[in-house]
Each structure stands twice: as C-alpha cells, then as structure tokens.
Image (tube, helix red, strand yellow):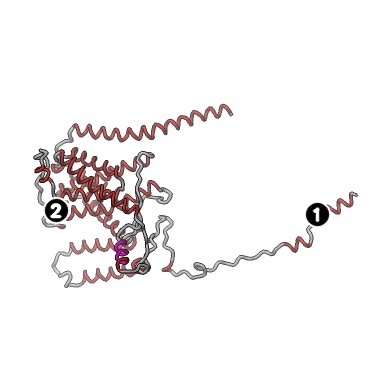
C-alpha cells in the first residue's frame, strides 16, 4: 500500500512528455523599423514640439490651401533680410553720402530684431490672424521695455532732448490745462465737455472689456481710476475735473458704453459657432469672403471667471491685475507731462495701442496660469514682459518726478489710501487666514488626543 502511494506521488510530481511538448517556443519580437510607421522621417518633417515649454509652434490645424504661410522659412527669411540690409546699407541712391544715417541705422536695428522675433519667438495663446503677428507684438513689447531701461539711466533734460530725434516738434513745455474751471451742471457745460476724448474713453473701455471679459472687474477698475484722478490732481492739473465729468460723462456714459459694447462682443464670440474649413472646402464668393474675414477673428473664445473670493491665489491675482491696470492707465499721463507730449501725439497713441495688443495675450496667459496650473507650468512670456514694462515705467516716472511735483500729498488722500490698503489686507485675513488658522489648530489639537488613546 505504501509503495503504491509513492508511485502515484512520483507520477504527479515528475513532468510528462505531453507537458514538455505543450510548451510553446519563445518567439522573437521583430525590431521596429526606423521612421514613422516604416516611413523615413526627413529633417524638415521632424516634430517641433518643445517638451520643456509644452507649447507647440502651430496649434491650429491650418488651411491647407495656404500651406506656404505656415511652413517654417527661417533660412529663407534670413537670406531675404540680409539681402535687404546689404542693399539699403551699400547702395548710394538709397543712403547718400554725407546724410545723417543714425535714424536709418536705428530703424534697421528695430526691423532686424522684429524679424528675429517673428521667426524665433515662441507662440502665445493666440493663433489668429497668424502666430507670427503675435510674435511681432511680443517683439515690439521687448523693444519698448529695452527703450525704457535705457531711459531709466538718463536724467529728465537728457530724455527730453532725445525725444527731439523722434519728433523735432517735441522738447517744448506744455501749458497746464484744468477741466474744473466751470463746474455748474448745465447743458451748455456738458456739451462743451464733449470732445474727441469722450470717444477715446469709450474705445478704451471697449478694449478693456475685451481684455478682462468681466463686468464687475471693469466697473471696479472704472471707479478706482476716478478715485486715482481725485488723489493725483494736485500733481497733474488735467486730472482736476468737475464732479459730473467724473461720474456722469466718464463712468456712467463713456465707460459704461464702452464696457457694454465690449461685453456684448465677448458674448457674441462666446456663443459663436466656430468652423475651421479652408478656402478649398468653401464654395461661392460670399463663403470664401466670409472665410477670409474670419481669419482676423478669434480662433476660439475663453470666458474669464476670475472668482476673486474663491481662494487667496485668486484674490491676489485680481488685486495684482487691478493694480497693474491702474498703473498702465496712469503712466501715460505722467510720461506725456514729463516728456512734454500732447495727448494726441502719435507716440502717446501708439503706446496705448501697443499696450492693448500686448495685454490681450498677457491676460489670457495669466488666467490660464492661475486657473490651469497643470497645463501652464510657468508664467507666459507675454504676461512676464508686460509686468516688466509697467514696472519699468513706474521706475522711470518715480526717478524723473523728483522736484517736478513739489506739492505734498494731501492728508485726506493719505488717510483714504491707507484705509483702502487696510481693507485690502483685512478681507483676505478674515476670509482665508482665520479659517486656515482654525483648521491648523484643530488638526494639532486632535493629534495629541489620538496619541494618548493609542
């Protein structure tokens, strides 16, 4: 009996011939073919994705009928740029001997840098009408920042003398102008106050609505700017306005009209049906014309919800953005007063248009950086250079203002801004700091109790 059990155990434990034959042989995996699915990848077809920035050079599936405008032409652009430089610099019929060539040299430097920015800068959040357009906007912002850094190391008389190189009519003191001489609330006074600057006010707030895309933000900024004018009218006489000019013409009419039209435009883009068909897929002259015009409209639209009371990060972002916008609004008034430029001078208007174009992608990048930190791993280039530009403007104004505005800050203004700063600090302390401190204390009170129970 014991012998039979040992034989049965030997049969079960020893491998049989059938089990050996059932084992399948190891199959070798063929080596992958080079290229993409067996097709060799040429050097100009390589993937240009930059993993360290998580930004693709061309985010839009562009129209195949205009493929040429979306191909990288870096070497061709370099050759064309060098050819133009050689022709302009060495041809006597373009630049005659004996003429002042400093202006032409400065223009050549600017054009060369903009060409480099168009070809080599990274893309931002916008792709319409073309990514190269927004790279050029970024290049203009960088040039303006470099000019401000240069001016920061000059004194005010030297800066005024340098402005004559841009326009020979500059360099002359401007007469002081006040808008608070006759403040009686009459139709005649209101009619006399209506000028081209009212249209400029409305257009400005139309642009701010497109940038901020939030009713409450625009209203807070509008009221805050009027308070800033009240606070600084002892330095700049043109800040002095009648009460109805501040609150009726500016806030209730011009600012509200521009904000309303701007937000209506935002709502139109928000509910718009977006199609990205090319010219070849559209039929008829009207459809093709509509497709060409749509190239100058947004590729898509993002609605901003700032939610300043949701968390401390959102609150800090809203306050920072409000302060930057106020500084961007006040800086041109001081710059034109210090450099003796009229409000309608092309340099002043160009600065306003440039700040608008630069702020569009900058605020978009800031919103994504705050609300989607997983995709935006670092602050965008537009918002970075925009913050640097506004900060450098403040430094230039602070340096040049020494001795230019001798009248001290009124006491009531000091108390008003001190109270405002106290409230700005008090709200996040009560809203976010106190609850966070309570949660911290509760966790540390529970920890010793858990240790004693265990």
67 falls in the magenta region = no
Mark 2 packing: few (<14 Cα in 10 Å), some, or many (20+)? some
Outermost residue, right direction? Answer: 1
Q: Secondary structure at mark 1?
A: helix
Q: Which residue is mark 2?
A: 161
Q: Quadrant of residue 250?
A: top left
Q: Main secondary structure of the magenta part?
A: helix
On screen, residue 303 versus residue 419, left or right, reads: right
In the rendered view, tell whether residue 195 sits above or below residue 82: above
Give the percent coordinates (x, y) of residue 22: 73, 62
Picture residue at 32% right of the left edge, 34% below the top: 425
Whether pointer 1 and pointer 2 mark residues with C-beta atoms closer than 8 Å, the reply is no
Question: Which mark, by number, is residue 12?
Answer: 1
In the rendered view, tell whether residue 244 sits above or below residue 374: above
Whether residue 71 appears in this view of the structure is: no
Q: Secondary structure at mark 2?
A: helix
Of residues 48 and 374, the one nearer the viewer is: 374
Q: CA distance from mark 1 to mark 2?
A: 105 Å
Chain part drawn in magenta:
288-294
Q: Quadrant of residue 291?
A: bottom left
Camera-nearest label, 1 or 2: 1
Of residues 219 and 403, the one nearer the viewer is: 219
């Amino acid at each position: 009996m014991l012998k039979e059990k040992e034989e049965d155990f030997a049969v079960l434990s020893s491998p049989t011939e059938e089990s050996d034959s059932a084992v399948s042989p190891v199959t070798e995996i063929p080596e992958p073919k080079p290229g993409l699915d067996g097709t060799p990848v040429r050097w100009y077809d390589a993937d240009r994705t930059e993993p360290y920035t998580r930004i693709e050079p061309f985010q839009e599936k562009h129209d195949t009928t205009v493929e040429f405008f979306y191909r990288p032409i870096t070497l061709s652009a370099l050759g064309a740029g060098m050819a133009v430089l050689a022709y302009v610099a060495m041809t006597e019929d373009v630049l005659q001997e004996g003429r002042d060539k400093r202006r032409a040299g400065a223009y050549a430097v600017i054009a060369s840098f903009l060409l480099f920015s168009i070809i080599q800068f990274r893309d931002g959040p916008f792709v319409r009408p073309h990514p190269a357009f927004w790279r050029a906007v970024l290049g203009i912002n960088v040039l303006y920042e470099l000019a401000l850094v240069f001016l920061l190391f000059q004194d005010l008389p030297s800066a005024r003398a340098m402005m004559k190189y841009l326009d020979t009519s500059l360099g002359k003191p401007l007469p002081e102008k006040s808008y608070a001489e006759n403040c009686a609330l009459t139709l005649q006074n209101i009619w006399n106050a209506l000028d081209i600057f009212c249209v400029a006010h409305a257009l400005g707030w139309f642009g701010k609505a497109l940038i901020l895309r939030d009713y409450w933000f625009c209203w807070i900024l509008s009221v805050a700017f009027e308070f800033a004018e009240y606070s600084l009218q002892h330095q700049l006489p043109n800040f002095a306005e009648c009460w109805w000019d501040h609150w009726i013409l500016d806030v209730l009419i011009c600012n509200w009209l521009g904000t309303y039209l701007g937000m209506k435009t935002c709502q139109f883009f928000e509910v718009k049906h977006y199609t990205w068909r090319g010219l070849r897929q559209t039929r008829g002259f009207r459809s093709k014309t509509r497709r060409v015009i749509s190239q100058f409209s947004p590729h898509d639209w993002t609605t901003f919800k700032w939610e300043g009371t949701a968390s401390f990060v959102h609150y800090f972002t809203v306050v920072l953005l409000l302060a930057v916008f106020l500084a961007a609004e006040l800086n041109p008034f001081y710059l034109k007063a210090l450099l003796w430029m009229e409000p309608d001078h092309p340099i002043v208007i160009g600065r306003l248009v440039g700040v608008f174009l630069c702020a569009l992608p900058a605020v978009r990048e800031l919103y994504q950086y705050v609300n989607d930190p997983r995709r935006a791993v670092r602050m965008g280039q537009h918002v970075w250079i925009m913050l640097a530009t506004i900060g450098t403007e403040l430094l230039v104004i602070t340096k040049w203002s020494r001795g230019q505005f001798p009248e001290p800050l009124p006491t009531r203004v000091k108390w008003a801004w001190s109270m405002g700063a106290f409230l700005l600090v008090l709200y996040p302390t009560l809203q976010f700091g106190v609850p966070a401190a309570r949660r911290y204390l509760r966790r540390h009170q529970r920890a010793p109790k858990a240790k004693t129970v265990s």
